[in-house]
Amino acid sequence: WMVHSFPTRRSSDLAVVTSRPSKGLTLVELLVVLAIVAVLAALLLPAVQAAREAARRVQCTNNVRQIGLALQTHHDAFHRLPPGWNAYPPNGEPGWGWASMLLQFTEQQNLLSGSGVGAQAGGPAGPGGPGGPPQFQINHASNKTLRESPLPAFLCPSDPSEKLFTLYQAGPGGGGPGGPPLLAVARANYVGVFGTGVVETAPGAGDGCFFQNSSLRFGDVLDGLSNTLLAGEHGSRLDHSTWVGAVPGAHRNMARVVSSAGRVPNHVPSDLADFGSFHPGGANFVLCDGSVKMINDQIDLAVFQSLATRAGGD
């Protein structure tokens, strides 16, 4: 038998082995890893944002489609479109807007109790007219809950603005907000198509589908239902619009429920009465036949204005 002897480690060798540091990332390697992560995040973030905007745009399109369906149902029930907004000068005008008269067709019937909106839904005639009860007026204290109710069906998810905003009294001659705050109202992102004129210049003579005390039938749309815009988007970059109506005495009260095709969508600079959205490239519109289209913000102005008129012969 042969006995093999194996060398034993000396204590000094063990000390060397145990004192050897564990392998890890150096500072340079850590910086490289962080740089790679930053590049990947920079590449992925726009894609994530684009996907989210695409989802919001789909939801907005669905909102516009539902508004078009509600307008079609209103027309079937009353044989006319709702007025752009009701107005009974010189005093006591209710001011309820076209969208407020769709609440019974958008599963919001409970908000209408006692407001007088339902009585006016078929057109300007009704208890809210001259001599009507004061509680039917838009600025009556009993309608506070109704005025301040943000409705998802009237809100574009791409608009980050607050859902409530304060209206101020118009300045002298109808200028900028020159007085105290009047009341708060719910924001909306969809307004009626007034036509091509200036809303404040001739509020009762719009060449579109919605204007003061309007009472139009689809038969009045001589340019064709599939060629005429009915309602569209209004972003809040400049100022807010509302579904409630034209609050008496408020700054630009009429231009908050209807817009005019004086400029193409998303035009810069813009006016409160212009159409626009937070979607890149254009704004959603519903036509009189109920179809929904994204109108490109590069559209020719003459074509856009032709689409905004109901009987221009074009």
Image: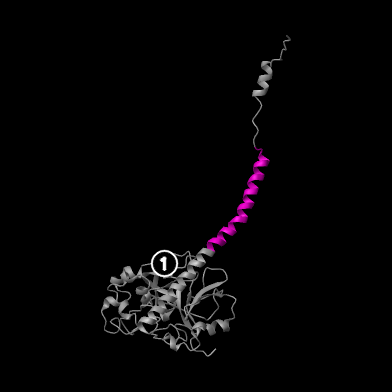
Between 54 and 163, the one lying in front of the other is: 54
Q: Is residue 33 magenta?
A: yes
Left/right placement of residue 135 relative to residue 224 reads: left
Task: Please tell me whether mark 1 sits on a helix, a strand or a loop.
Answer: helix
Residue 163 in the image, given as x and y percentages of width and height: 42, 65
Residue 230 in the image, given as x and y percentages of width and height: 47, 80
Task: From the image, tell me which residue sits under label 1.
Answer: 152
The magenta span reads 25-53
Between 261 and 57, the one lying in front of the other is: 57
Quadrant where the image shows the N terminus: top right
Residue at 62% across, 56% down: 43
Instruction: Specify the amino acid type for callout 1.
Output: Pro
Q: Residues within 10 Å of mark 1 (few under 14, many from 20)?
A: few
Q: Quadrant of residue 2?
A: top right
Residue at 32% across, 70% down: 111
Q: Is residue 243 magenta?
A: no
Residue at 65% across, 33% down: 23
Left/right placement of residue 7 relative to residue 97 reads: right
